[in-house]
Amino acid sequence: MSPITITALILFAATYILMLSFQKIRPYVTVTSALIFVVLGVIAAANPTIFGENFFTVANGTYSYGLSEALGEIDWNVIMMIAGTMGTVYLFIESKMPQLMSDILISKMPNVKWTIVALSLFAGIVSAFVDNVATVLMIAPVALAFCKKINISPVPSIICIAVSSNLQGAATLVGDTTSILLAKQANLDFSDFFVHDGHVGMFWVVQSGAVVSALIILFMFRKENAKIEFNTRTVVEDKFPTFLLVGTVVTLIAVSFIPYKDNAQEGQFYKPDITNGIICIAFFLVGLLRELFVKKNKDIVKNSVKEIDWFTIVLLTGLFVVIGGIKSAGVIDIIGSAIASIGAGSPFLIYTIIVWMSVILSAFIDNIPYTATMLSIVPVIAESIGMEPTVLYYGLLCGATLGGNLTPIGASANIAGIGILRKEGYEVKSTTFMKYGVPFTMAAVITGYLLLWVIWHP
């Protein structure tokens, strides 16, 4: 390895260690690391021999990573999609429509066990289009209410809602940040999650996992046969945010039939790379303008902007630049070749390694930076063994999204659910969480792991 490759590898490892050790300052860590990569690129361009004759030499030439290249690595479509979707979801939550939907659902259930299964499935369906944490914040209070009414512990119910919301984050393009990142890397659109190149899409694989997981939940709560009565329904006075969210999804589906430039035939109309981001931002802005000028509600406008996860946005922005830096330094090629050699060139073995490595690592580390990094490594692995990367991409998404359900700290939705319970006076031990999280995760991952290979194996 060249000196710049070793330097980049050490810097990348230090970045990850610091992110894991000091989670509250992760955005600052990635931005600082990104700046160092850019500074190294500027130095390489200005004086390539300052650290020695071959310091900046890499396998494919010379390390070149200035400010313009770094800015080019930032995917503004992803950033805008995250910001716009989160803003619209906040307006949707404030309208109380999710609570009404949950109330109606509970009123149709015969007993406790079916109510818990129904709420878990409902949380999953909502989470396919809404941020996972937001889903938990919407539906957990409903579960708390019915648990209090029939005097049972809400801990198992909230855990099941959290893990179900994590599962469905992989179902659609807007379900989770990891799905948005995958779509960018693999050049997927909204409809590709349903049908992709004539094959069953990720959405249906996730639903298969959801059905198997629901059977697990039903078995775990098989003794909870108490009847419930839940006649109180939330009143929704403003349905406009619901139309905004539905409009966002429908428009994303509609434009998914228009190709990007790279996939368009000669002379065919194509859409800009930031189309999906513009759609998400546009619907959010319509909601903001209505609140500001029609309803004269400045507070909700301020709160909706505050509720956007700027922490994750800054983290991703810095991470995009860092990943671009290690690409330029040749680190991605080295990691990809190493994984390919461990898999002995076997597509199935490499697929298995990626899925289960993702499950294990995502149980303890944030799956967003992990997924962003691995998405750059996967095509290198695929090319080195002469296969299409599609099944590896989907295996990565399956493992990284669902692995967080193994532990209470593996996903933000889990942390949010436990936080709600703590406020209610319930302390959740890791063993208690894993009692429900582990069987749920194993059922969903094994289902997805097998189905994806059957559908997409080379």
Image (cartoon, helix red, strand yellow):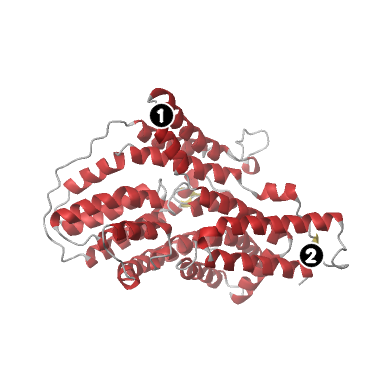
Q: Is residue 129 left or right of residue 427?
A: right
The residue carrying mark 2 is 58
Residues under labels 2 and 1: Cα distance? 54 Å
- Which label sits on residue 2? none
Count of number-bearing discs: 2
Residue 229 rendering spot, x and y as whole percentages: 12, 49
Nearer to us in this view, 266 or 207:
207
Quarter-of-image position of residue 226:
bottom left
The residue carrying mark 1 is 291
Callout 2 amino acid: Val
Residue 107 rendering spot, x and y as whole percentages: 17, 46
Asked if 396 appears above or below 287 in the picture, the reply is: below
Asked if 206 appears above or below 190 in the picture, the reply is: below
- Label 2 Cα crowd, 10 Å radius (few <14 / some 14-19 / many 20+): some
Q: Nearer the viewer, mark 2 or mark 1?
A: 1
Label 1: which secondary element: helix
Callout 1 amino acid: Glu
Nearer to us in this view, 148 or 130:
148
Regarding residue 157, the answer to whether it shows in the image is yes
- Label 1 Cα crowd, 10 Å radius (few <14 / some 14-19 / many 20+): some
Asked if 190 appears above or below 298 in the picture, the reply is: below
Residue 192 rendering spot, x and y as whole percentages: 49, 47
For marks 2 and 1, the one nearer the N-term is 2
Q: Is residue 312 left or right of residue 335?
A: left
Q: Is residue 312 left or right of residue 50?
A: left
Label 2: which secondary element: strand
